[in-house]
Image (cartoon, helix red, strand yellow):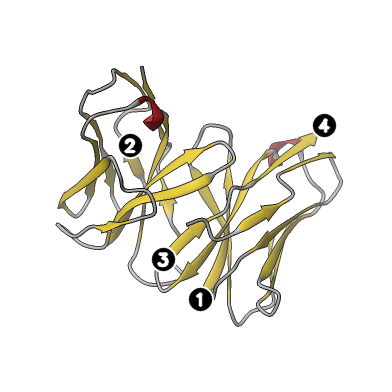
Amino acid sequence: SQQGEEDPQALSIQEGENATMNCSYKTSINNLQWYRQNSGRGLVHLILIRSNEREKHSGRLRVTLDTSKKSSSLLITASRAADTASYFCATDWNNDMRFGAGTRLTVKP
Amino acid sequence: DVKVTQSSRYLVKRTGEKVFLECVQDMDHENMFWYRQDPGLGLRLIYFSYDVKMKEKGDIPEGYSVSREKKERFSLILESASTNQTSMYLCASAEHGSGNTIYFGEGSWLTVV
């Protein structure tokens, strides 16, 4: 069954603004990953955060994890039109990876 | 670069046909997966395999079977295609163990008419 649930389902912002997407999950995890999917293509890995980490950065990406609230957020700073895509969180528990339904991000030039 | 290749990008099949979706990875990964993606439902796991000739059911295995005769190849089989199997199918692979990146193919769009 689906594990993560992303919020919001869709997000539309102007270029240069920050985009924040949230993921909530229900059970224990070893780690949580974020993936990006361009329209009609496969998913591409963005960043992984382990259950004992609270925050991680990669370029313009910032991921936080709160295991007490069973939630994670992905922040994209200074967004670009090329960031337009769907973003998925994936929870990993003992090699069992489950994906949410995704957030559709549109960045307007 | 890791490459996961799905043999068919777009397919149109008739109801009742047997359909094969092929997937090959070139990184010697132990784990391979088949997902189905539908609007609003995200990715749902159909089957996965952690070794040659091994398979495990995912969340929605009904109407599907899989074959893994070689480590690099994982096939999804629709024994008798139905219209409710019209969807995008994604193959993926990963090294065994927790915390490893999953590498996806480009997807196969299947339409059953």
Q: CA distance from mark 4 to mark 2?
A: 33 Å
- Residue pointed to by mark 4: A109
The reply to whether callout 1 and callout 2 are in contact (CB within 8 Å) is no
Mark 1 or 3, nearer chain start: 1
- Mark 1 or 2: in front is 1
- Residue pointed to by mark 1: A30
Identity of the residue drawn at 70% across and 45% down = A9
Mark 4, Cα crowd under 10 Å, few <14 / some 14-19 / many 20+, is few
Q: Position of residue A98 (x, y in %)?
A: 48, 59
Q: Mark 2: which secondary structure?
A: strand
Answer whether residue A27 is visible to the viewer in this image. Answer: yes
Q: Which mark is residue B6?
A: 2
The answer to whether tags 1 and 3 share a subunit is yes
Mark 1, Cα crowd under 10 Å, few <14 / some 14-19 / many 20+, is some
Mark 4 or 3, nearer chain start: 3
Q: Position of residue B54 (x, y in %)?
A: 18, 60
User: In the displayed structure, does residue B53 sit left or right of residue B111?
Assistant: left
The answer to whether tags 1 and 2 share a subunit is no
User: In the displayed structure, does residue A43 sit left or right of residue A56?
Assistant: left
The reply to whether callout 4 and callout 2 are in contact (CB within 8 Å) is no
Identity of the residue drawn at 25% across and 37% down = B22
**Foreground of the two, A56 or B57:** B57
Mark 3, Cα crowd under 10 Å, few <14 / some 14-19 / many 20+, is some
Q: Position of residue B47 (x, y in %)?
A: 31, 52
User: In the displayed structure, does residue B92 sit left or right of residue B74?
Assistant: right
Q: Mark 1: which secondary structure?
A: loop
- Callout 3, which amino acid? Asp
Q: Chain of mark 4?
A: A
